[in-house]
Image (tube, grey):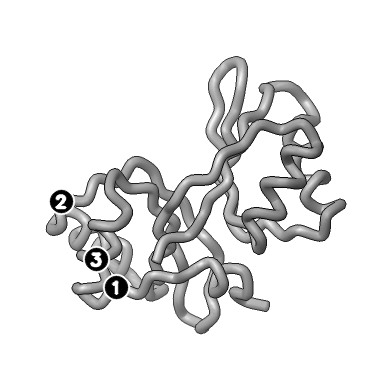
Amino acid sequence: MSVKQISVFLENRPGTLEEMTESLAKNNLNIRAMSLAETKDFGIARLICDDEFEASNALKEAGFISSLTSVLAVEISDEIGALSKTLKLFAEGNINIEYMYAFREVHEKGYACMIFRVNDVKAAENFLTGKGVKLLDQEELAHASR
């Protein structure tokens, strides 16, 4: 049960990030989670939006280059050590984490969500759900904390 993340390539200059977010706002699209990585000449914004296909289209119409990637959205209890316990399961399952970032509180109070890009999404889904880990789908993320 993976979700789709939009990776947007951004020129590293003032105003580019605002232009990208404005193109989504104009189309009434909400960013649910975001990570930004940069190099000297360009950046990559990684987004989870309430409607990934509409967001991709809006970005394309605004002249941005983007791609869709499958990632895992993992519900984690908001308590000390919960992330460590989850990461221990990743290690146990030999699941390589390429990158991760946080998402705000999800549908139930007391839970947060982490977005994980892993080397083998299907194998990770099967292993983690077999261990009782709650994976969120696109619909749950789109309506989280509303």
Q: Which residue is disc 1 drawn over?
A: 133
Q: Amino acid at mark 2?
A: Asn
Is 40 situated left or right of 25 in this image? left
> Residue beneath label 3, please?
126
**Residue 33 location, quadrant:** bottom right
Q: Residue 80: x, y in percent?
A: 33, 70
> Is the residue 37 above or below the residue 53 in the image?
above
Q: In the image, 57: left or right of 80? A: right
Numbered tag placed on residue 94 in the rendering? 2
Q: Residue at x 72, y 60 (%)?
A: 30
> Mark 3 belongs to which amino acid?
Asn
The label number, if any, that marks residue 106 in the structure image: none
Q: Percent from the top left, x then y, of residue 127?
A: 20, 65
Question: On the picture, is 47 further left or further right than 92?
Answer: right
| Foreground pick, 47 / 114 | 47
Residue at mark 2 to residue at mark 1: CA–CA distance: 15 Å
Sequence-wise, the earlier of marks 2 and 1 is 2
Q: Residue at x 77, y 31 (%)?
A: 63
> Mark 2 and 1 residues: CB-CB less than 8 Å, in contact?
no
- Label 1 secondary element: loop
Query: How many labels were placed on the picture?
Result: 3
* Mark toward the start of the polypeptide (3 vs 2): 2
Note whether 35 is above or below 31 in the view shown: above
